Amino acid sequence: MSQFDYIKDIAKFGLENDQEKLFTSLNELIEHSKKTKKINFAIQLQSLLKDAIRQQQISGLTKVGSIKHTIREDDREANEFIIEKITSDYRFGNLVCNDEVRSELKYFIQEHNKIELLRSFDLPVANKILLHGPTGCGKTLASYVISGELQKMMVVVNLGAIVSSKLGETSKNLAKTFKRAASEDCIIFIDEFDSLGKVRDYSQDHGEMKRVVNTILQLFDYLPQTSIIIAATNQQSMLDNALLRRFDLSIQFDLPNKMQIEALIALTLKNGKFEFDNKIIAKNIIKNCLGLSYYSIQKTLITAIKRSLFSRVDEKRIPIITKISTSVWKEQIVLEKKALGVIK
Ligand SMILES: Nc1ncnc2c1ncn2[C@@H]1O[C@H](COP(=O)(O)OP(=O)(O)OP(=O)(O)O)[C@@H](O)[C@H]1O
Ligand SMILES: [Mg+2]
């Protein structure tokens, strides 16, 4: 059967309200998509199906206080703490980093690709990873790479909403969210992990922070080995030591050096449609980029590319390769540095 045949069946059974056959066809399409290497599509369908089944099991009239009612309430609340569920096509080629970061990430990915091997030797699988370092240096991007390389769905958790000023509430929210996210074989991504530190400001009571840390440690321990937790922070010092120790891996992301800036530029210009109007000046500008993040450098370069393109719009024929104005790029870098307070 082709993909279209499955879609026709799904439409037919959907319109006929034949749930059983609809679910069977959907499962067949999921299997077909996996075989034809449309893994991300298969993962998304699988998640939709799971959600629908779960929803059905707990829908309908429920009695307050019954188990079904409690699950439904917990689900509703947990969903509020989940920003999005995504799949990713990012690969290692999208990330510029030093050899150490690359090798650590590669080993981490290997652990999950070779999970059966590790299990057969009773070896634990590393599944909790902390990414830290300054803003705009690829922490979120690296999480997309992990998701893309492993072809696993990523559930992005809204820690800002989970952390509550109400006593005991943060722990409860965390537990609900983890339980919900871990019910699927996925990556749980907790960005701005340092916002947990707010608990300390909210409550003078030392016990509250302890409670939160304990909850997280427990949740970490109960996490199925196929699930992965990625936490990211640009303020590692805000985090409790007891918590830091529980990560299997802690990876430091840094500002780019000259070689990495060159690699980032090559990556940004990889479609071959743009090149610098003066390579020597461009080389000099790269030196000026030191101290800026990958994000800032890429942003200024893209702005220069767009402006160089606009300046050619009036020409009758836009050439196949557009020259990037190095003077515009240089100007943008100065502006970026001023905006960040790097220079006055
Ligand atoms: N190491 C990198 N390699 C390639 N591109 C990068 C890298 N770091 C950042 N970028 C570019 O900058 C964008 C923003 O980076 P990203 O969101 O990963 O930063 P971050 O470290 O998560 O920052 P924050 O701490 O503010 O969340 C990326 O989508 C990518 O376009
Ligand atoms: Mg980020």
Image (tube, rainbow, N blue to C red):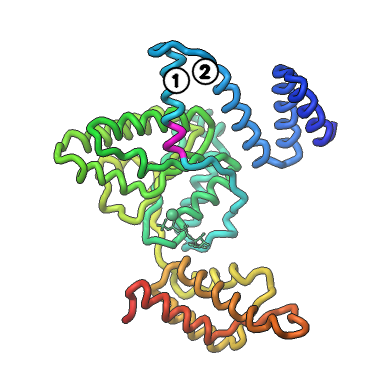
- 222 in the magenta segment: no
Identify which residue is drawn at 69% across, 80% down: 313
As helix, strand or loop, the secondary structure at mark 1 comes to helix
From the viewer's side, name the closer residue of 70 and 149. 70
Q: Position of residue 231 (x, y in %)?
A: 40, 45
Looking at the image, residue 218 sits to the left or right of residue 307; the answer is left
Identify which residue is drawn at 45% across, 78% down: 333
* Callouts 2 and 1 close, C-beta under 8 Å: yes
Residue 45 vs 54, above or below: the answer is: below
From the viewer's side, name the closer residue of 113 and 92. 92
Identify which residue is drawn at 27% across, 35% down: 212
Whether residue 129 can be seen here? no
Residue 326 vs 188, above or below: the answer is: below
Disc 1 target residue? 71
The residues bearing labels 2 and 1 have C-alpha atoms spaced at a distance of 7 Å
Instruction: Determine the main secondary structure of the stretch shown in magenta.
Output: helix
Quarter holding ligand 2: bottom left
Disc 2 target residue? 58
Q: Where is residue 156 in the image (x, y as percent from the top left)?
A: 47, 42
Answer few, some or many: residues within 10 Å of disc 2's Cα (few below 14, many 20 plus, some between 14 and 19): some
Q: Give the range drawn in magenta.
A: 78-82
Question: Label 2 is placed on what type of residue?
Answer: Ile
Q: Where is residue 323 in the image (x, y as percent from the top left)?
A: 65, 83
